[in-house]
Each structure stands twice: as structure tokens, then as C-alpha cells.
Image: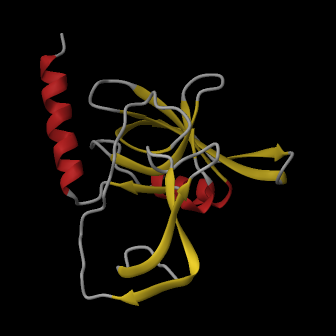
Amino acid sequence: MFMEMEWREVEIFKVINAIGVSDVVFNNHKIEIVRETIVNPTDYVNGNLFFSFVNYALKHYLIDVIGHVTDYGETTEINSFQHGPGYKKFTFEIENASKQRLSCVAWGEKAVQMSNIFSTLDSDMINVCILRFWKLDIHGGTEVHTSGERSQMMINPEIDEVDHFLDWMQISYEESP
């Protein structure tokens, strides 16, 4: 079993074409575990989170984006054809250093979790939000949605990428008229 943030050595696997509407990577391949696959623990650890931040216009991928929180609403309940009545929805907006805004929608249990986190934010500070493995939707505008349990969100994590973003944002805002 693979667990996030646990490193493993993997031997004997297939590389196959990835087919689907939402891809996690920019190539068309994925690793397939086969019956002969050997997975062993390892002492190797790498703290790199391997982010691949993209602009807000990339289509058909699960993407990573970074921005600061500019607005958020309340959790609402909707009648979902797939999930039934009372399905939770939470919307918010982030802005990147180029001043591009992106509408974001979390669904289900993620909506409740995110609403709780957002309610504790200090509105007097810049709150940096990293979204990982979110699905870009271009039908009716540009927004990202959670994609099941794989979508992740981090608010103000103490990592280098946030420091770089804040530096980039400060430079961008100093250069604007």
C-alpha cells in the first residue's frame, strides 16, 4: 500500500498510456502496478513536494495553483443529481502574482473542512493558498473544483514556494501603475 509522504522503492512495473478527462501529469503515461511488482520500504526521504504551479488557463489536467485568498463565501447546500439533497458547496477566490483571479469550488466534505479553515483566517494578513490536484473547469468561465479526495489545500504553509510567491507578488505589485 502506498501512503502519501512515505517513500518506497518500486521494482517491476509497466508504463502505459494514461487515458481520461483529467490527467495529473503533462505527459500521457502512468505507472501501472502489476502482479510481479515489488514494493520495499526505503530510508531515502526527500522533502521536495514537487509542485508544478501553472497559469490559470491550462485545460483538462489536475493542476497545482498558488495564490492569495481574495474572497470567500459561506458553505451552502445544493440538490445534487449525483449526491442527493444537502450536498455541500464552498466557494472562494484566489489571485496570483500576475493579478489573475481564479474562482474555486470545494464540494462535499472538503467544502466543510475548507469553510472551517477559512473561518479562522486573519483578514489583515496575506493568506497564501496552495491548491494541489484540482480540476480546471472552463465551461462557463474559469474555475477549479475539488476532484474527490485527491484534491488538497494548504493555507500559509511554511515552505519555500510560499516565500517565493510572496517575493514575486511584492515585485509584481511594485511594478504595477
Residue 14 location (% of width, % of height): 51, 68
Q: Which residue is found at the position 84% from the left and 45% from the top?
A: 79
**Residue farthest along the top direction in this orientation:** 177
Instruction: Identify which residue, 120 or 20, lies in the foreground.
Output: 20
Instruction: Identify which residue, 20 or 85, lies in the foreground.
Output: 20
Instruction: Identify which residue, 24 or 10, lies in the foreground.
Output: 10
Q: Is residue 49 left or right of residue 16?
A: left
Q: Is residue 89 above or below residue 138?
A: below
* Total residue callouts: 0
Quadrant in the picture for residue 177: top left
Q: Is residue 172 left or right of residue 124?
A: left
User: What kind of colouring is applied to the model shown?
Assistant: secondary structure
Quadrant in the picture for residue 138: top right
Q: Which residue is found at the position 23% from the left and 72% from the top?
A: 46
Residue 141 location (% of width, % of height): 59, 22
Residue 174 location (% of width, % of height): 12, 22
Q: Is residue 69 above or below residue 154?
A: above
